[in-house]
Image (tube, rainbow, N blue to C red):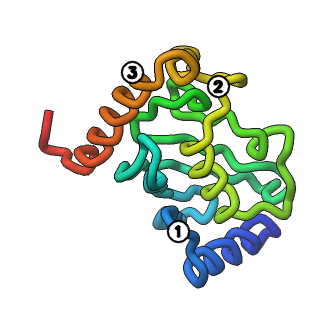
Amino acid sequence: MSTTARRRLMRDFKRLQEDPPAGVSGTPTDNNIMLWNAVIFGPMDTPFEDGTFKLTIEFTEEYPNKPPTVRFTSKMFHPNVYADGSICLDILQNRWSPTYDVSAVLTSIQSLLSDPNPNSPANNEAAQLFKENKREYERKVKAIVQESWDSDDCDSD
């Protein structure tokens, strides 16, 4: 069963392997090219530095004409990330273009970490702290960065 979406995702995956952008990675899940697991490393010189954040990317048969659904599965404190991990990012909504591939999506999310848009908040508390109390914002971000290191440890808790 080779649809346009699946062929395109195979190409995206090949490109991601051959020319991986710095600080992001993504792979399809074992038996499903339409569902990917991805990792974004917190950008240098930001409060997210050293964080390892996991995401899922879900594609429909309409990809690349429709954007994928991308969610953080790691805990995230960011003005443009909802409580459920979904991301408020223009290229994932009204500014989507079929020219974007998985690599572009992941690098856009990574740059959103270093450059939030507090005027279009998905998380009002994070947006308000980002604008009015940077120190407290950065303290909360650093806490989720530390949590991101422990998330692999299933035995804790």
Residue 71 rendering spot, x and y as whole percentages: 56, 41
Q: Crowding near pointer 2: few (<14 within 10 Å), some, many (20+)?
A: some
Q: Which mark is residue 118?
A: 2
Name the quarter where the N terminus is drawn.
bottom right
In the image, what residue occupies the spot 71% across and 23% down? 119
149 relative to 113 in the view: left or right:
left
Q: Earlier in the sequence, mark 1 or mark 2?
A: 1
Residue 27, percent from left and from top: 52, 67
Q: Secondary structure at mark 3?
A: helix
Residue underneath mark 1: 22
**144, 128: nearer the viewer:** 128
Rounded to the nearest whole Å, what is the CA distance between mark 1 and mark 3? 28 Å
Residue at mark 3? 136
Q: Residue at x 73, y 52 (%)?
A: 60
Q: Amino acid at mark 3?
A: Glu
On residue 8, the disc is none
- Bin the neighbour count of mark 1 within 10 Å (Cα to Cα): few under 14, some 14-19, many 20 and up: few
Q: Which residue is nearer to you in this view: 8 or 2?
A: 8
Q: Residue at x 14, y 32 (%)?
A: 157
Q: 11 or 95, which lies in front? A: 95
Image: 71 above or below 24? above
Residue type marked 2: Pro
The local secondary structure at tag 2 comes to loop
Question: Seen in the image, is 66 located left or right of residue 144?
Answer: right
Kind of residue sitting beneath label 1: Ala
Instruction: Count all numbered tags in the image, as a single digit.
Output: 3
